[in-house]
Image (tube, rainbow, N blue to C red):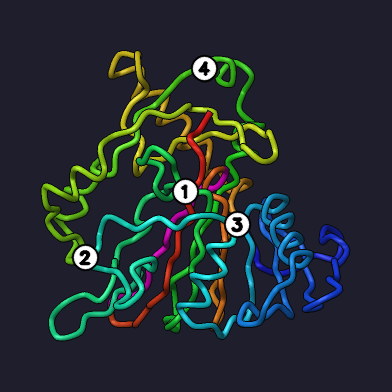
Amino acid sequence: MSLALSPSTQAAPTRHRRDDFVVRRLDAPLGAELTGLDLGSALDDAAFARIHRAHLDHHVLVLRDQRITPRQQIDFSRRFGPLQIHVLHQFQLPGHPEILVVSNIVENGRPIGLGDAGHYWHSDLSYVEKPSLGSMLHAQELPSEGGDTLFANMHLAYDTLPAALKRSVEGLRAEHSYLCKYEALRARSPWRPRLSDAQIAQVKPQVHPVVRTHPETGRKALFVSEHFTTRIVGLPEDESADLLARLFAHSVRPEHVYRHRWRPHDMVFWDNRCVIHLATGCPDTLRRRLNRTTIEGDRPF
């Protein structure tokens, strides 16, 4: 799970005619680092197509040294599709509702962002009818220790399932709910406000395939997570819980996971259709703030 590049495993650098940035595969089960790219300048269609291709190939892109504004982040995100507004409108960036502030900072006695985002492994917005295509998280303030984010490759998790387990999950469907662990988090977290009736109505549970097909590449991936997946439809409660526990444990085996150690101005763009992630946390005394945009995807199949 090291961020270091390995000469024996990294792909040959890919240079782009315009904006001349380099893509290097990370020494990890997923992920690539992009350097020499400025999202604050206009990207031609060829450069954008190469970023899109790298995202499909590597699932997590680490775009280094992005000194961009919230509006520039929104504009770049929108090139991939419509943006989704998070149900916790309390933590929208003022003036930019498309951005969810992820932060442990408290100002004037009130949190400015969602401080416990990513407490459990999850895929962003898997609990809506059209789950997220991907998320972009842009570093604003980083702690001097901690604050890493883990990403698990759900294509690899599916590919490496034991044969009998792989057969058993084909054709199954699972329920996803934003409320699955909300009250448990709220009981011990200052970051979780009481949801209004209108907010609860926005996040009615949805049912999706346990194994989904990526709409752009055709590859299969597990599509369950401990944060939002509540049950396997049609199975007795004990069998559902046992099967989900086995899938959750298998998904996040070390050989499936990349640990991202944040650097100033990093922008990380991951594919929620085939990746789950987890925030490792940092000491409460250290400030951490990032801006997140989330791109609407397709109905899973």
Residue denoted by label 3: 258
| Amino acid under disc 1 | Ser
Placement of 270 over or under 212, stated as above or below: below
Relative side of 113 to 259, left or right: left
| Amino acid under disc 2 | Trp
Q: Which mark is residue 191?
A: 2
The percent position of residue 89, horizontal first and vertical second, equals 25, 63
Q: Helix or strand or loop: what does disc 3 sit on?
A: strand
Relative side of 5 to 204, left or right: right
Quadrant in which residue 131 is drawn: top left
The percent position of residue 149, horizontal first and vertical second, equals 49, 63
Residue 277 within the segment the image draws in magenta: yes
Which dot, 2 or 3, sits closer to the camera? Answer: 2
Which dot, 4 or 1, sits closer to the camera? Answer: 1
Q: Which mark is residue 299?
A: none
Q: Which mark is residue 132?
A: 1
Placement of 36 over or under 171, stated as above or below: below
Residue denoted by label 4: 171
Q: Helix or strand or loop: what does disc 4 sit on?
A: loop
The percent position of residue 200, horizontal first and vertical second, equals 18, 45
Placement of 112 over or under 271, stated as above or below: below
In this view, the residue in front, 297 or 180, is: 297
Which dot, 2 or 1, sits closer to the camera? Answer: 1
